[in-house]
Amino acid sequence: MSDRSRPTTVRPAGALGRRLYLLLLGLVFLAVFATAQAGRDPWHTLFVDPLINFLVLFNNVLLGQFGLAIIFFTLFMRLITLPLTIRQFQSTKAMSAIQPRVQEIQKKYKDPKRRQEELMKLYQEAGVNPLGCLMPMLIQFPVWIALYRALIVLVGGVPEAVVDLSQHLYPWSYLYSAIPLEQHFLWLNLGRPDATFVLPILVGVTTYLQQKVSTAGSTATTPEQQQMNQTLNLMMPLMFVWFTLAVPSGLGLYWLVSNVISVGISYFVYGKRGIDWRRVLLPFPEPAATARGAGRPTSGRRGDHERRRRGKR
Amino acid sequence: MGTILSPESVRTAVRGRRLWGTVALLAGLTLLATACAAAATPRGWASPVVSQGQLYVSLEAGRLSAYEVGTWRFLWRFPGQNDRNVRPQAIYGAPVSTADALYFGGYDGYVYAVDRAQGGLRWRFKTDGPIVAPLALDEASGTVYAASDDGRVYAFDGRDGSLRAGWPFRTGGSIWARPLLDGNTLYVASMDGKLYALDAASGRKLWEVEVGAGLVSNPVLANGTIVVGAVDRRLYAVDVSSRSLKWPSPPRAENWFWAEPLVVGDTVYAPNLDGTVYALSLADGSVRWTFAAQNPVRARPLLTGQVLVIVDREGTVYGLDAATGSEAWARQDLMRRVLADPTPVDDQVLIVTHDGNVFRLDPTSGQVQRLDLPQP
């Protein structure tokens, strides 16, 4: 029996978890307020600057290899946000598992109020929060924007960027010893786009894999959704190839490492059998899937599992 | 005749519109993110140079233009249309000039020699790193000294660009500060935290002083003392005769001393990236007065008469009484980023902004006027 045919439930955050979230949120608001009162920019003081200094610290610990610092720092940041990422993937997986039943309810009940009640009942039974995959993503979002800004400040390497960097570094002589940061790593100049096209292609391929693998737990329920997924699966990698061709390759390196980690996490969450590698590697699902109509799984082995499951019922 | 739309065709149309909407959104996001991330391109901050009635200024990244001072007639621009493979990327150091040639370093790593009359390329020499430091020139021997981000100091014959025997000299870090020539000695401030004294002819190391933090500002020599700023937020003074640090407790600021200090008599004027301008005693480094600018200051201060002209990073221009540090006239706002050093021209001061605009400042009244230089 495949992992997909088993009903998946996500352990709710619980009262303690909710209190922890609220406490964290309260502390962040307090810090933002205090920083603003002190006449400083809260965004940079609380989010971007600590990341910049941490990244420079990594650089010094790793013997001045800024490329290695980006790799290890990305690993570190992904590790910190791992519980949220896993929760997000689990929620996606759980939501996907109950999609056939959601479809049934939507077909069965025409009255919106009744339909909503039945859906809520279903979510409660399955222990799924429909916004469960959204919250962890929202919480991580500022972290990734701050990380992105920190990298932009650091990877430039040009003197103008170093003048800007001077405004962000903490007064710790250990950090200064790294200036200017070593911009060469493997074949890359981290401050410039990769002219060899190797990094953009790697980023494109890993973005494609990451897109496909991270949505392995979700199922397109309508042809529109399926078409949208297909478009995204092709557009996102192309978009990132374009980004990597245009921005300093230090950012490209960050995307590459981040994508590889995301694929790893997806593999960990969905399990060996949870990922249909044939589906992952094919850019388009089998055409028959669309003809089967809404509410049915999209393709291949997953479709077979679903049919068997329905047959048993 | 009207067209009857089937429900299927309506659904297809809606689907198509959504799809194209998604594609357009992604394309927009791509452009936006690319624009945001493309901030780290080198622009250069070479200060303008006036020599023999001509102004040499970099108004665009990697280009040098020549104008006739006074009439502001355009003379030439380098690289010209015929120099297709010449792309200096950005010019950070002010050019140095002889009677018939100009020399400067490019961020592409080349040292360029340009014909002064026509603006044509005479020769160029590739170093192994970008050149940020201004060059130094020994007019007597015709030697051009260039320090590169590759950590080496090169000495060339200014006529043909051939490397002098015994050069380059290698330091342990990048060099972003101008080599300082004094007689037969060339002083080099390196990011490896050392100040080197080299024999200007042979490139042999004479001595070195360990400062301990990367030296970032152009060093200045006055009364046997070299003053130089470091990234550990301190300003150091090295006594050349005793080859040791002079000040017992080097003044410490909130940020780096990147601007080239100005030494007049026994006073050192040193702006800092924390926005403070320090007036210090050359003898012991004690603070005489400070002035708080609104923004970080990277440009070198300039003394005209008794007025010390300071330009901060965001383009605010201050005129300070050099003796007390009080403001001599109301500050002017150029509303543009300024990283290049101001340059005196006759009785005025030229300020080049980072976006390639040129302003004329009257240092006695503080009046600022934009100078519209003709473009080729």
Image (cartoon, coloured by chain):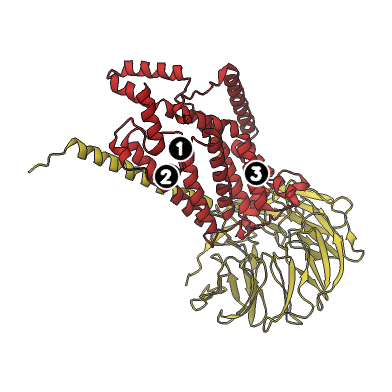
* Residue A40 shows up from this direction: no
In which quadrant of the rendered view does residue A19 lie? top right
Q: Which sits in the foreground, A104 or B184?
A: A104
Give percent across and percent down for residue B251: 81, 50
SS for callout 1: loop
User: What subunit carries mark 1?
Assistant: A
Circles 1 and 2 on the same subunit = yes
Question: Which of the marked residues, 1 or 2, is nearer the chain's N terminus?
Answer: 1
User: What subunit carries mark 2?
Assistant: A
Report the Cα–Cα distance between label 1 and label 3. 25 Å
SS for callout 2: helix
Query: Mark 2 highlights which residue?
Result: A233
- Dot 1 and dot 3 residues touching (CB under 8 Å): no
Q: Residue at x 12, y 39 (%)?
A: B4
* Residue B216 shows up from this direction: yes
State the quadrant of the N terminus of chain B.
top left
Question: Which of the marked residues, 1 or 3, is nearer the chain's N terminus?
Answer: 3
Q: Colour of chain A?
A: red
Chain shown yellow: that is B
Q: Which sits in the foreground, A109 or B358?
A: A109
- Residue that lies at the very extreme toward the left in this rendered image: B1
Mark 2 neighbour class, 10 Å CA radius: few under 14, some 14 to 19, many 20 or more: many
Q: Which sits in the foreground, A59 or A13?
A: A13
Query: Mark 1 highlights which residue?
Result: A215
Mark 3 neighbour class, 10 Å CA radius: few under 14, some 14 to 19, many 20 or more: many
Which of the labelled discs sits on residue A73, or is there none? Answer: 3
- Dot 1 and dot 2 residues touching (CB under 8 Å): yes
Q: Is residue B121 left or right of residue B239?
A: left
